[in-house]
Image (cartoon, helix red, strand yellow):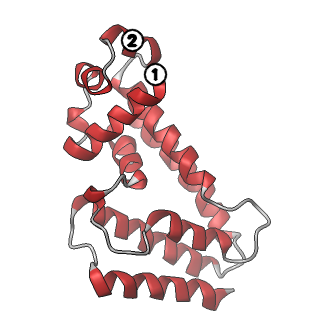
Amino acid sequence: MRGRILDAVERLLVSAGADAVRLDAVAAEAGVSKGGLLHHFRSKQALLEGVLNRLVDRFEAELPPGGSPPGAFTRAWLDATIPDADAPARDHADQVSVALLAGMSGGPEVLAALRRHYETWQRRLADDGLDPATATLVRLAVDGWWMARLLDLAPPGGDLHRGVRARLTAMIEEGT
């Protein structure tokens, strides 16, 4: 049931934003009673923490383990975040965007958890065997890209999408 509830929170976040995540709306979207929801999640903050933790776990499952070849973590960061083909964020479950929404809207505790993950990820990028400035530049470019996708702030599309992704990939390859 926890998974079904978290799926409902993700759908609400993607379709209507953080304001749509209300206990009654989540219960209805998940097809559970409000009591069933409260058994698993005591508050909106707990729901958002649950979504963030689940999505961070999924994201980390796509990242290589420590000791991987140089550039592997930075390359996986790009691959896990920006699809090869251009597709608007609203057309698929953009997990990073949902995690960002959850982190930004879940209060200081949820945002603090997201910041701790980012500190860990940044250390891994800096220790990825590339010039740390290059790895960080790739992270910042990717983060800005998915923010543009999330908020529909003129994200690169079509040939530009493919060209920007190819340039980021080349930066990683040049650094290994």
Q: Which residue is mark 1?
A: 1
Closer to the chain start, of discs 1 and 2, is 1
Relative to 117, residue 83 above or below:
below
Q: Can you name the residue that lies furthest to the front here?
A: 31
Relative to 40, residue 17 above or below:
below
- Residue 20 is at least partly visible in this image: yes
* Residue 27, quarter of picture: top left
- The reply to whether discs 1 and 2 touch (Cβ–Cβ < 8 Å) is yes
Residue drawn at x 34%, y 25% as measured from the top left? 44
* Percent x, y of residue 51: 44, 37
Q: Amino acid at mark 1?
A: Met
- Residue 106 is at least partly visible in this image: no
Viewer-side residue, 133 vs 29? 29
- Number of numbered markers: 2
Position of residue 100 in the picture relative to residue 63 (left or right): left
Viewer-side residue, 111 vs 63? 63
Q: Which residue is mark 2?
A: 36
Viewer-side residue, 159 vs 147? 159
Residue drawn at x 38%, y 84% as measured from the top left? 162
- Disc 1/disc 2 C-alpha distance (Å): 9 Å
